[in-house]
Amino acid sequence: MTIASRHQARKLTRRTLGYAACLLPFEKDGSISTDSFQAAVARTTDAGLGCAVNMDTGYANYLEPEQRSLILKLTAEVIAGRRDFIAGVFVEGLDGDLVSLYRTQMDEIVSHGGTPILFQTTRFHAWKPSEIVNLYSQVCEGYESVMGFELGSMFAPNGMIFDEETIRGLIGIPSLKGIKHSSLDRGTELRRLEIRDEIRPDFRIFTGNDLAIDMTEYGSDYLLGLAAFCPELFALRDKYWLEGDERYAALTDAIQYLGNVSFRAPVPAYKHSCAVFQNLIGRCPSPLTHPKSASRPDWEAEILADCAKRLSYEITQ
């Protein structure tokens, strides 16, 4: 897609559907902070965004099954029918039939009122497009709504970016309502939008590009870890865009500055950046991350304090 055609494709005053991939916070003793997590779910929902839990921002790849179940319960308690939420289905490293492994977790998510989003597994890396599409067709059969997930390998080794043949096949699955696309590549995502518009215009492409949050201008919706840092500002940004408010650009630039700092290499350490940021503004009891997750240097708080001030947050730590 050329630069000119990109600008022609911008969806001015479009209503954006946004989800924040909620961070799982920890207490100073290293235990899961259930109160802070539920406060984050409430804050995100009150702002008008959807919550996505048990995602990579929530350390889904490190949690035990009973911990993921706890997160579903805590989320459902807060939202309580107010709106939908999305929850990750993570099968990497599990032995057995993939259809059964996926659907077992999907059933649990649906029982709590959530919509499943399917993490990829390294098993897919050796598969043909037809094999992946056939598996998703079997996994999604009978469910009202399921989401897919393209997770770039810079986020996790089990992820992959599908080829176009696979994408076309997946878009044709009726129960699959959308895909989160996390390649961090504008061109690839723009091509996803072209294919979507050609095949199934109501199919959702949720940008996972925290380095280019303006992809929503071109027709993407979003499911972002960056939105967990400041969900109310994302909601305000969406409002400005819908209303054609000139303040949209300045707020987008300020949020993107935070994204560029937090999602620098190594990319998985953005979760530690989020914990540090949330701790700085008094929303997280500690800056701790999951012990198995990548961490940031000791000076992270200093640079994130500058980001927070630019976004008009008060530093409380």
Image (cartoon, helix red, strand yellow):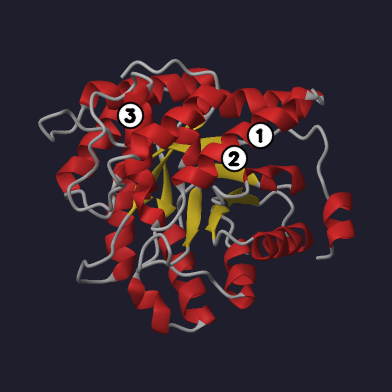
Q: Please identify the quadrant where the C terminus is shown.
A: top left
Circles 2 and 1: CB distance less than 8 Å?
A: yes
Q: Position of residue 256 (x, y in %)?
A: 59, 40
Q: Position of residue 104 (x, y in %)?
A: 27, 54
Instruction: Give me the C-alpha separation between circle 2 and circle 1.
Output: 6 Å
Quarter of the view holding residue 153: bottom left
* Front residue of this view, candidates 182 and 101: 182
Q: Amino acid at mark 3?
A: Thr
Q: Considering only order in the chain, which callout, 2 or 3, is on the residue closer to the N terminus?
A: 3
Residue at the image position 34 percent from the left and 76 percent from the top: 123
For residue 256, the mark is 2
Q: CA–CA distance between discs 3 and 2?
A: 28 Å
Q: Of the numbered discs in the image, which one, if any, rests on residue 75?
A: 3
Residue 4, quarter of picture:
bottom right
- Distance, label 1 to label 3, CA atoms, is 28 Å
Badge number at residue 252: 1
Q: Nearer the viewer, mark 1 or mark 3?
A: 1
The disc, 1 or 3, on the residue closer to the chain's N-terminal end is: 3
**Vertical order, 272 against 158 (above or below):** above
Q: Which of the image's four quarters has the N terminus?
A: bottom right
The answer to whether mark 3 and mark 2 are in CB contact below 8 A is no
Residue 110 shows up from this direction: no
Q: Nearer the viewer, mark 3 or mark 2?
A: 2
Dot 2 falls on a residue whose secondary structure is helix
**Which three-letter amino acid code belongs to the residue tagged 1?**
Thr
Crowd rating for badge 3 (residues with CA inside 10 Å; few <14, some 14–19, many 20+): many
